Image: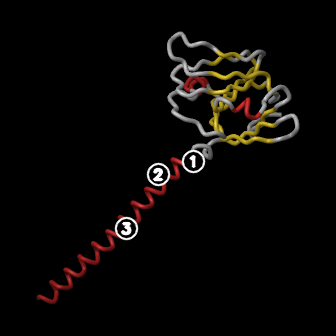
Amino acid sequence: MLDQFVIFLLTIEQYNNITLSMRKIALLFTVFLFFSACTSESVSGTPIKLISPEGTVHTFSVEIADDAEERAQGLMHRESIAEDAGMLFLFEEPQVLSFWMKNTLIPLDILFFDENGSFVSSATMVPCEKDPCPLTSSKIPASAALEVRAGTAKKLGVTKGWQYADPRMKR
């Protein structure tokens, strides 16, 4: 009987050791997934390209806002944005596009493009501190607007002749 009890205790100890090892593995895996999600800020979006008149390509990873709800939410309540990230707002028909910075915490550049992906105008927008928030509009009708970290348009030298391209474009 004592022999059976000792075997039983050994079995429980082995089970606990295995369970502890599995718990450690599960914890490490969870930590890995958490940090992977935290560092994928600019990797998780749709890749688009800004192309200079000379053919230099700058790739951005963007969230697509192509319906009224997504466009209304925009980049509100974000505390930061990666240097190569942004949000691309797409519209069915060319129109003068207007944006505001209500509940947006970070300064942004907005670049407007026509239905062919050609640059039409840009502006730098700062967070709105009180209502009514000012509007920033495209200078002529546009079909897309790209919001990126403030200073990006100046840094890249985005002006007339630039294009944007994304895999979803109908050209």
- Please tell me how crowded label 1 is: few (under 14), some (14-19), or many (20+) other residues with Cα within 10 Å: few
Which residue is tagged 1?
40
Horizontal and vertical percent position of residue 84:
66, 40
Which element type, helix, strand or loop, lies under badge 1? Answer: loop
Foreground tag (2 vs 3): 2
Left or right? Give the position of 94 relative to 61.
right
Identify which residue is drawn at 74% across, 24% down. 112
* Residue at the far right in the pictured view: 54
Q: Nearer the viewer, mark 1 or mark 3?
A: 1
Q: Is residue 110 above or below residue 156?
A: above
Q: What residue sits right under mark 2 in the picture? A: 34
The residue carrying pointer 2 sits among few (fewer than 14), some (14 to 19) or many (20 or more) residues within 10 Å by Cα, namely: few
Quadrant of the rendered image containing residue 148? top right
Cα–Cα span, label 1 and label 2? 10 Å
Give the number of the disc on residue 22.
3
Q: Are marks 1 and 3 in contact (CB under 8 Å)?
A: no
Amino acid type of disc 1?
A: Ser
For marks 1 and 3, give the CA distance. 27 Å
